[in-house]
Amino acid sequence: MRKRIAIIGSGFAGISAAAYAAKEGNEVYVFEKNEAVGGRARQMTTPAGYVFDMGPSWYWMPDVIERFFEDFGYRTADFFELLPLDPQFEMVFADDTVAVPRSYDALKALFETMEKGAGSRLDTL
Ligand SMILES: Cc1cc2nc3c(=O)[nH]c(=O)nc-3n(C[C@H](O)[C@H](O)[C@H](O)COP(=O)(O)OP(=O)(O)OC[C@H]3O[C@@H](n4cnc5c(N)ncnc54)[C@H](O)[C@@H]3O)c2cc1C
């Protein structure tokens, strides 16, 4: 039976719940208190045109995201292309910049330069 469903919040959880509920043929409404959709994963654009991602940086659990798109007859590649980054990102401090490398061995070597033994301790985590 077709239902009227209200979803509170337009983060990943709300949007995905709304998508599945709509796919089942329900009438779905998403209510969002912020001006922009996306929740913690929303973007902020300044008047000067700079765009900031407000939350996620790491593309964790790609299999889950792929499965979500497949449930709706798409592939993630229909919408975006993933490119490996090296360095993955840079941390900018007042007096230093640290580039985080893609390779695990290079990361261990970097940690070792910061604290003796920190590189090998990564293996124990
Ligand atoms: C700085 C930061 C970095 C992160 N980095 C990563 C990362 O690298 N990789 C990763 O996978 N995850 C990361 N995360 C976590 C990821 O962003 C969140 O797990 C995910 O976005 C949460 O989605 P959600 O839908 O559960 O909740 P939210 O995104 O919080 O969505 C909840 C929504 O509900 C709305 N809402 C709440 N109450 C009401 C109400 N009463 N009426 C209407 N609307 C309401 C809120 O405004 C919000 O839009 C990061 C988060 C932050 C903040």
Image (tube, rainbow, N blue to C red):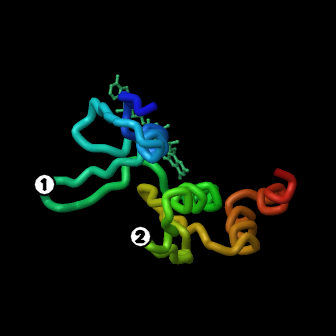
Quick one: which residue is furthest to the left in this view? 47
Q: Which mark is residue 67?
A: none
Question: Residue 1: x percent and y percent?
Answer: 46, 31
* Side of 34 relative to 25 (left or right): left
The image position of residue 31, as x and y in percent, is: 30, 31
Q: Amino acid at mark 2?
A: Phe
Q: Nearer the viewer, mark 1 or mark 2?
A: 2
Q: Residue at x 69, y 74 (%)?
A: 103
**Residue under pointer 2:** 79
Question: Does 67 sit left or right of 24 as displayed?
Answer: right
How many other residues sit within 10 Å of disc 2, few (<14), some (14-19) or many (≥20)? few
Which is more toward the observer, 30 or 27?
A: 27
Residue 12 seen in this snapshot: no
Is 93 or 13 nearer to us in this picture? 13
| 25 w.r.t. 4: above or below | below
Q: Is residue 17 above or below residue 48?
A: above
Q: Amino acid at mark 1?
A: Pro
Is the residue marked 2 within 8 Å of ligand 1, measured from its CB?
no
Find residue 47 and name its label.
1
The front one of 65 and 58 is: 65
Ligand 1 quadrant in view: top left
